[in-house]
Image: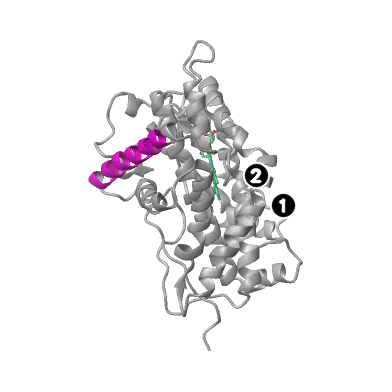
Amino acid sequence: MELPGGVVVWAITHHDTLQTLLADPRVGKNPRLWTTFREGRLPEGWPLTNFVSVPGMVTADGDDHRRLRGLVSQAFTPRRIAALAPAIEARTIALLDRVAELEGEFDLREHFAYPLPMQVIGELLGLALEQQDRLHELSDTLVSSSATPAAAVAAQRDLNALLASVVAAKRAAPGDDLTTDLIAAREAGPSTDRQQLSEAELVGTLLLMLVAGHETTLNLITNAVRALLAHPDQLQLVLDGAQPWSAVVEETLRYDSPVGQFPLRYAVEDIEVGDVVIRRGEALLASYAAAGRDAGHHPDADRFDLTRQPARHLSLGHGPHFCLGSGLARLEAETALRHLFGRFPGLALAEGRTNEPIASFVSNSVRTLWVTVRPAG
Ligand code: HEM
């Protein structure tokens, strides 16, 4: 398929093929494997530049990948995530207290689905509350594949500058957060014969944690609420206790993947896939949303069905780059949904409002989710 700027890639849309290629050692993520990148043929201000070239674990393979992922993975162990549960619960309740004060129709994405994951990742990274909205605005431009080249370049520049200023502030006044831990890892110097973390990798890792840590969970909560409100029979199954909230989270991940497609991977050598050959140096796009609706893998794929046993999907990735924050995302989404519907059982989609899709093929959700706390009439 052709991406913006006339960049041609292979979109991998079938579940089984995607699963195989995500774990195939003949597929890498270092952009230097990509002929178009190496030859400098990407258009100036290409909106996905950051995805392919941000220095960090998403664009690294092998030892480099293990080194970069290893530096943050201790913060995401099941034990560390479980320890965050009470704080996530408290944030959820506080946000819903504010939602309860809103009158008439309101945008649930803006008032609930966004602030929850942003505050959680903000606290993990040690970001001040007053920085968070600006970071979100810049991060939104970054994940939008429809930004103009000038806007994309400006957002990348401003986001890097803002995160560099966060690093400078933490250097001066260390905190109890992941940013401070990363600075300490960098300042511990080369562990063996290689630099443990370069300054660019430090900022790149923060950028990745910020974007991956909130844009995705924001979409998951939005997409889950939207699906439940459009399928009241399925919502009733959970409210009656016949299905757990975790089933909603897993089925939403499959049915409406928060990450529509993730750029990019590259063939390290020629790879035969069915009756085509992906040539060495060509690029692959992981099409998670399409794989979730692959009728060859999921019977009756277009049906939102909480009783699927089990709701297998690839929407958190697979293989060495499997989502580092999957436990956190699941915990946040389950907590959010349980409290939201517990508190507002009469939640309904606002009538006469349309919720436009986000103009991006990376971020898959709607720009707004207009709801009312009580059904009209
Ligand atoms: C619903 C929420 C989430 C979804 C759907 C999601 C999805 C994904 C997917 C599909 C990948 C693989 C990308 C690829 O290489 O193709 C990924 C990787 C990653 N995710 Fe998530 N994610 C979510 C939440 C989070 C959270 C909350 C964090 C961090 C706090 C996070 C951090 C990461 C990181 C660091 C990677 C890169 C791992 C690596 O390259 O080794 N994600 N995620």
Q: Amino acid at mark 2?
A: Ile
N-terminal of the pair, mark 2 or mark 1, is 2
Residue range of the region highlighted in magenta in the rendering: 150-169
Query: Assess mark 1: CB under 8 A from ligand 1?
Result: no
On residue 310, which mark appears? 1
Instruction: Name the spot of residue 17 as percent of width and height, x first.
Output: 57, 38
Q: Nearer the viewer, residue 146 or 186?
A: 186
The quadrant of the picture occupied by the N terminus is top left
Q: Is residue 210 left or right of residue 359?
A: right
Protein image colouring: one colour
**Cβ–Cβ under 8 Å for marks 2 and 1:** no
Can residue 298 be seen here? The reply is: no
- From the image, tell me which residue sits under label 2: 81
Q: Residue furthest top?
A: 193
Residue occupying image coordinates x 56% and y 25%: 66
Q: Nearer the viewer, residue 368 or 185?
A: 185
